[in-house]
Image (cartoon, rainbow, N blue to C red):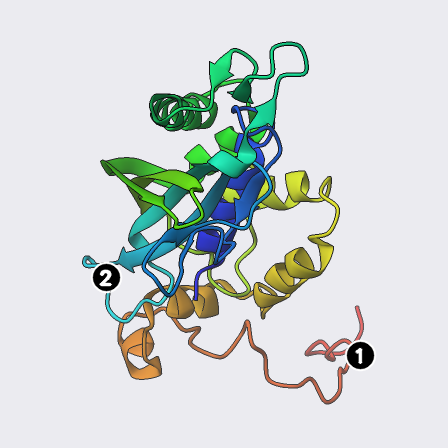
Amino acid sequence: MSLVRIAARIAAVQALKGKTSVGDNVLDSEIGALDVDGDGNLRSTKPKPFISVYTDEARADDNQLRAWVSNGRTEFLFEAGVTAAHAETDTETGDSLLYPGVPDTDAAFEFHLDLIARQIGDALSDPENEWAEIFRKFTNTIVRIERSRTSSGAKDGTRLAAHQVKVTVELVSDPPKGEPLSARGPMALFFAKAAELTGLSGRIALMREQLIGTPLEWEASMRRFGIAHSEADSLLITPATVAEGGLPIVAVNAQPAQIAGGPV
């Protein structure tokens, strides 16, 4: 329903890549990155530590008339997971390390996940991070930040721990269909920056197509607020003589009218 929701999530994913301890292993809405098996054990099939970004529940309370473009408060979920299977053996010491200098222990798991949570906040508030700047422009304010953790030990001895950071933000409204984008607005900036990405061109094209429409100001206003034609007429939003939509021009008589009294 929301193009802003999609764009903000993509911006968050791109903003985190290469900016945390998981490197580029930042996933967009990858369902199953963390899962629960038939025995109730938490599991992950990912070969190394990861962050997965989701958009979850949203609620727009202060809606104007019948507007469908309001996004309201939206939950962004940042899930980080690490398992004993992600550890590597130090060739010199033989020790099992989560990453250099950090041993494969339960305390190290918690250290890693707490560190990731901090790195997420640092990356998304970095003034030098262009993708983070776009994400911030999509959000009017951060309403709430919640953190939770879970862990599991499978029967085969594999240990896994995960943290979730839930950030509730006030998202800006979607641009109405047919309304020109502001060159300095977040959606225009997103489309310009997204042109650098590979593998997302199809999705970006579909998002652009959704915004194409009749570029008439009064129609855009009706779409933005969900106004009925009778209401628009009463509010003097619609043109009095359909000047913008236009009656079809059948013929044009370019001959000047005869001046009374004949030629001078």
* Location of residue 131 with respect to 104 vertically, above or below: below
Numbered mark located on residue 63 in the image:
2
Question: Residue at the location (46% across, 24% down)?
Answer: 104
x, y percent for residue 130 = 57, 27
Residue 244 occupies which quadrant of the picture?
A: bottom right
* Nearer to us in this view, 61 or 75: 75
The type of residue carrying mark 2 is Asn
* Location of residue 39 with respect to 111 vertically, above or below: below
Secondary structure found at label 1: loop
x, y percent for residue 28 = 53, 49
Whole-Å distance between the Cαs marked 1 and 2? 54 Å
Q: Are marks 1 and 2 in contact (CB under 8 Å)?
A: no
Disc 2 packing (10 Å; few <14; some 14–19; many ≥20): some
x, y percent for residue 25 = 59, 37
* Nearer to us in this view, 150 or 41: 41
| Residue for badge 1 | 255
Question: Residue at the location (54% across, 50% down)?
Answer: 45
Which residue extends farthest left?
61
For this view, does 174 lie left or right of residue 196? left
Secondary structure found at label 2: loop
* Location of residue 146 with respect to 213 vertically, above or below: above
* Nearer to us in this view, 14 or 127: 14
Mark 1 or mark 2, whichever is nearer to me: 2
First in residue order: circle 1 vs circle 2: 2
